Amino acid sequence: HPAFRVSNYEDLLKRLEQAGFGVTPDNMLGDVERFYTHDPFGNRLEFIKEIGSWQQKREKSLQWQYGNKVKLDHIYRRR
C-alpha cells in the first residue's frame, strides 16, 4: 500500500473522519504517528506525520525492528 508523509497530519485526519472515512491509528513504530484509511475502491492508504529528518526516522524504524543492538553507522555506510 502507498504511504504519504504529510505536514498537515491532524487536519487531514479530522477532515477524513468528518467526511465519513474510517480512520485507524497505528503506533507500531513507536514515536511515528500514522493512520490508515481506505479509498472509495478499497485500497489501503497510510498517512505519516512528518517529523524530524529522514535519518532520525530511519534510525527509529531500525531500532524498532532490530532493537538497540543494531550498529546504525554500519548500515548507513553500506549505501
Image (tube, rainbow, N blue to C red):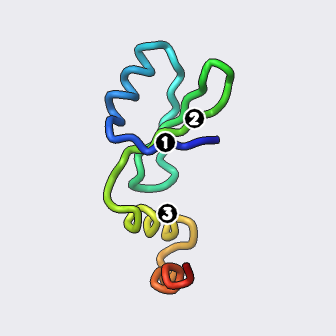
Q: Position of residue 34 (x, y in %)?
A: 45, 42
In the picture as drawn, the residue positioned furthest to the top comes out as: 19
Badge 1, how many Cα within 10 Å: few under 14, some, many 20+?
few
Gap in angstroms between the C-alphas marked 1 and 3: 16 Å
Callout 1, which amino acid?
Phe
Gap in angstroms between the C-alphas marked 2 and 3: 19 Å
| Image-quadrant location for residue 41 | top right
Badge 3, how many Cα within 10 Å: few under 14, some, many 20+?
some
Q: Nearer the viewer, mark 1 or mark 3?
A: 1
Gap in angstroms between the C-alphas marked 1 and 2: 8 Å
Q: Earlier in the sequence, mark 2 or mark 3?
A: 2
Looking at the rendered structure, the secondary structure element under dot 1 is strand
Position above or below: 46 against 67 = above
Residue beneath disc 2: 45
Verify CB contact (< 8 Å) between mark 1 and mark 2. Answer: yes
Callout 2, which amino acid?
Leu
Verify CB contact (< 8 Å) between mark 1 and mark 3. Answer: no
Q: Earlier in the sequence, mark 1 or mark 2?
A: 1
In the picture as drawn, the residue positioned furthest to the front comes out as: 79
> Going 53% across and 22% down the picture, which residue do you hit?
22
Query: Total label count?
Result: 3
Looking at the rendered structure, the secondary structure element under dot 3 is helix
9 vs 33, nearest the viewer: 9
Q: Earlier in the sequence, mark 1 or mark 3?
A: 1
Residue 24 is tagged as none
Residue 61 is tagged as 3
Residue beneath disc 1: 4
